[in-house]
Amino acid sequence: MSRRPAVLVRVVVAVALLALLAVDVRLSVVRDNREEVESARTEALASARKRVPAVLSYHHRSLDADLARATRQLTGPFRRDFSELVRSTVEPAARKSQIVTKAVVRSAGIVRAKSDKVVVLLLVNQQTSTKSQTAPRIDGSRVQVTMQRKGSSWFVAAIKPV
């Protein structure tokens, strides 16, 4: 009979140790995920501040290069949709009206974040001049930008005015 309590104590201790190990592993995973998300927030926000002005800025004299640069900032279906919009609308208007536009991010913040996808809100000023309006006009806008991780870099997966 004295062996049963000793075996029972060992089993209880072993189960308790396994439970503690499981809790420790779970907390480690949560901490690592939190660190991944924090890193994603920082990297994606910095990338959005750099990439969005490249997408929204162009000069009629360097339109092909500017629009190619803009497309390289994009990923997913948005890249195809943007290219179609540029070909059908932006490019003809820019050439005809000799549009020059420069976008500058004035402020930025995180809306929500996961380790591979971050949504940011950008306040953007866009300075535009045309053949008929040589004095630049400045328009402010708010855009919600979805940034998607692709490899070790972040690309624009969507831009939505808000």
Image (cartoon, rainbow, N blue to C red):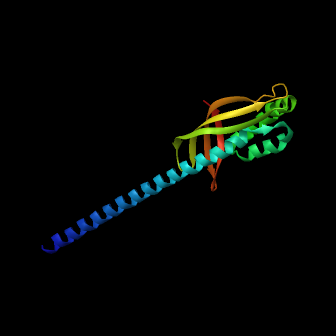
Residue drawn 85% across the image and 28% down it: 131
Q: Is residue 140 left or right of residue 136?
A: left
Q: Where does the image place residue 90, in percent across and percent down from the top left?
A: 79, 32
Is 135 placed left or right of 34 in the picture? right
Q: Residue 38 at x, y = what percent?
A: 50, 51
Q: Is residue 34 above or below residue 127?
A: below
Q: How many numbered marks have been drawn onto this rendered protein structure?
A: 0
Residue positioned 64% across, 30% down in the render: 141
In terms of image quadrants, where is residue 91?
top right
Residue 40, position as x, y percentages in the image = 55, 51
Residue at the top extreme of this rendering: 132
Q: Quadrant of the C terminus?
A: top right
Q: Position of residue 15 (x, y in %)?
A: 28, 64
Query: Residue most toward the left?
Result: 1
Q: Nearer the viewer, residue 16 or 146?
A: 146
Res 122 seen here:
yes
Name the residue at 69% across, 40% down.
78
